[in-house]
Amino acid sequence: MSLAPSGFLNLGAQNLEYRMIGPVPEHAPTIVMLHEGLGSAALWGDFPDRLQAATGAGVFVYSRAGYGASTAVKLPRPLDYMHVEALEVLPKLLEWIDFRRGLLVGHSDGASIAAIYAGGVQDHRVLGLALIAPHFIVEDVSVASIAAIKTAYETTDLRSKLARWHKDIDTAFYGWNGAWLDPKFRNWDISEYLTYIRVPVAILQGVNDEYGTIRQVEIAREECYCPVDVMEIANAGHSPHREAPETTLDAISEFANAVLRDEGFRAA
């Protein structure tokens, strides 16, 4: 099946919006991008297009259910929602797009989903992971910042700013925010999956990340047996690809190109 440049893919009860930038998986490696907890396909901006130009690989972005223009979800989200995305939804999505080889690039929740997938499924087609501001455990700073953004959402114009990216902004926001602020979520810990990752990992961490500390990086270094390259990005917080786009693009494209060169792929 040939992927159109944009549209919706059907995974049973879910219709997920997507963009396919550059060559389809049949013709080149594919970089699959997994958005943050309040993200969507569109919220990546032009970063996927620039990543495609820098690597020559195809770049696939999509909105998970409950985000962007994708199918709505019922609230509250289950506290294992990232496990569900990684172990149940993502395998079906990769089959749907005819994924053959490439990388996963994830931001925040998306980075955690990528790590769970790589460690839990161990898909030989995935050649590397680029994780932007990943979470492997819940930290106090994460909970404090997520509580603060809830207040901002309910008392400022943040809701209207986010609404341009989601057809149902309250579902998108409270589905994410409610799970992270549930007291039971403090026990969420995916570090065990890191032990089983068998491909190179690049971690990009903003020095001023308000949602996580360098402890997340330390956990990856402690648990992973695979190579882990870390870049701490100055003058960036939780979203380096928006706050320091050139540095972030250079780091991810350099990592992707090195991994793909090892597989015999040359950028166009």
Image: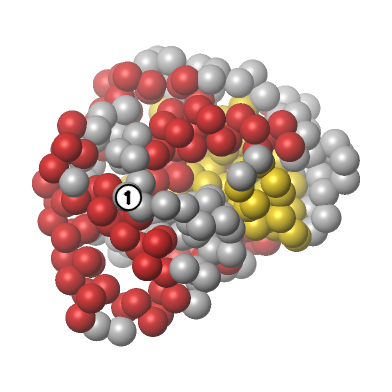
The quadrant where residue 239 appears: bottom left
Image spot of residue 74 (x, y percent): 42, 52
Image spot of residue 251 (x, y percent): 51, 48
Look at the numbered disc 1 and give the secondary structure of its residue: loop
Labels in figure, total:
1
Give the residue drawn at x 82%, y 49%: 3
Q: Amino acid at mark 1?
A: Pro
Q: Nearer the viewer, residue 138 or 79?
A: 79
Quarter that holds the N terminus: top right
Give the residue drawn at x 24%, y 83%: 156
Position of 258 with respect to 58 (left or right) is: left
**Dot 1 surroundings within 10 Å: few (below 14), some, or many (20 or more)?**
few
Image spot of residue 228 (x, y percent): 41, 28
Give the residue drawn at x 39%, y 82%: 160
Position of 242 with respect to 96 (left or right) is: left
Q: Is residue 13 positioned above or below 178 on the image?
A: above
Give the residue drawn at x 71%, y 55%: 8
Image spot of residue 136 (x, y percent): 30, 34
Q: Is residue 51 visible?
A: no
Q: Is residue 39 visible?
A: yes
Position of 89 with respect to 182 (left or right) is: right
Q: Is residue 152 positioned above or below 82 on the image?
A: below
Identify the residue position indicated by label 1 in the image.
76
Q: Nearer the viewer, residue 190 or 223?
A: 190
Q: Nearer the viewer, residue 268 or 79?
A: 79
The quadrant where residue 50 appears: bottom right
